Structures are given as structure tokens and as C-alpha cells.
Image (spheres, grey):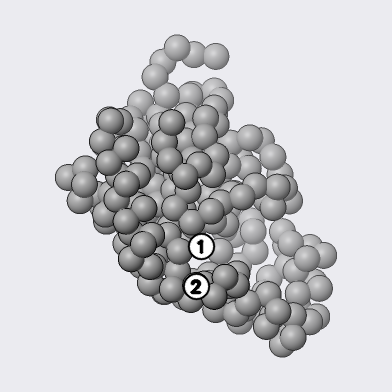
Amino acid sequence: MTKSPPTTVFLLRHGQTVNTLDGKFRYNGHIDVEVTDESLETMRSIARQLEAKHITHIYSSNLRRSQAGAAVIADQLELPLTPLSAFREIKMGCWEGLTYDEVKERYPEQIKKKFTDFINYRIPGGETIPEVENRVFNQLDELLHTHSGEQLVIVAHGGINMLIICRALQMAATNIFRLKQDFCCVNQLDYYHDFVQVNLVNSPCLP
């Protein structure tokens, strides 16, 4: 273990999307949906808490639901926002925008194959988990190298955040559903040169 200061990542999930106000989970993937005004107010509250930190850079997925919340934080902290396509949600292909029940009805064989081999099965038009990990981890590792010892904010998506946390905990991606990411949740990961300390997971606020 090292005493050098870590690179701290405050990893957030975007706010509630307008197409989930009915309470149903949807495979939004790469479709570009808006978030609710209420969720932006929640992000504003988190932004005020982040003022007590020493944030140097703010990044987000380049999908609107992540950019919107990240923009609120960037405005509050008077920092630029850098959207990155690498932090987009897992691409769900022909499932995008559908609920679980709709997918089960339209694509029963696909859903059976996906949940039999979640990691490697490719939904038509979608991505495999190793493909997602490749783009996400390459980008994250680049940021950690570039901003060593700094404090960053990344606003991404449920699936992306869970993959990042799984890797930090040295858990296989097959354990992804052991984790939970609520809308607007905050995670804190401290990256040292030889290990990662996960200090906060799925919290509605900073400690």
C-alpha cells in the first residue's frame, strides 16, 4: 500500500429518464432520452455537496441523460464538461427502449440466450460485455493516468458504473447484478497505484 494521494473518482448515475416515469425498467441503451426536472434538482443538490471537494475535471457519457446532470454539476462548480462516447451505456440493439416484458414477448429466444450467457451473447445490433469493458476501461485508465492524484466527477449509466465497480472490487462481470445503481446515485472510488478503495456505493448523497 502507498501513502501517495489517490486519484478520486466520484462516479454518478444519471437522473430518472422521462420514459421510466411509469415505474417500468427500460433497456435504454444508446437511445437519447431526456431526464426529469426533478432529477436535475437532485443533481444540483449533489453539486453543492461536491463544492466541498477539490474537483478538477468533470466528464460524462455523451448521451443527453448523463450530460444534463453533469452540466448542472459543471455549472455549479464553474468547470468545463467533457462528454465522452466511451462512457455510453451498454448498447442493447433491438431491445432499446423496450421493457423486460416487451422484450420477453417479442424476442423470447434472445432473452433466453442473453440470460444464459450474459457476458458473451450479443443482442442483434448490440454489444457484448467484453466490448463494453474494453471501451470503458481504456478511457477510464487514460483519465486516471492523466489526472493522477486529482479528484474527478464522471456521470455515466447504471451498467457502466456497475462494470467499473466490479473491476475495482476484483469481481467478475458476472456479478454485475449483485450491485445496484439508483438514479442520481453517488459512488466514490479512490485509485492508488497498486489498489482501489471503494468508499461509497449507490449513495443518495456524499458523506
- Nearer to the camera, 130 or 64: 64
- Nearer to the camera, 145 or 165: 165
Decide if residue 117 is on the left or right side of residue 13: right
Element under disc 2: loop
How far is mark 1 from mark 2, CA to CA?
Answer: 19 Å
Mark number displayed over residue 202: none
* Three-letter code for the amino acid on which mark 1 is drawn: Glu
Q: Earlier in the sequence, mark 1 or mark 2?
A: 2
What residue does disc 2 label?
A: 21
What residue does disc 1 label?
A: 89
Q: On screen, 134 above or below 92? A: above
Name which residue lies at 69% across and 52% down. 177
Q: Quadrant of the N terminus?
A: top right
Q: Residue 123 location in percent, x, y? A: 67, 74
Q: On screen, 146 above or below 157? A: above
| Residue 87 visible somewhere in the drawing | no
Q: Quadrant of the C terminus?
A: top left
Q: Residue 162 location in percent, x, y? A: 59, 49
- Nearer to the camera, 79 or 205: 205
Q: Residue 169 location in percent, x, y? A: 63, 35
* Three-letter code for the amino acid on which mark 2 is drawn: Leu
- Nearer to the camera, 95 or 187: 187
Count all numbered tags in the image, as a single digit: 2
**Neighbours of disc 2 within 10 Å: few (<14), some (14-19), many (20+):** few
Q: Residue 145 location in percent, x, y? A: 39, 34
Q: On screen, 84 above or below 64? A: above
| Residue 17 visible somewhere in the drawing | yes
Q: Residue furthest left?
A: 78
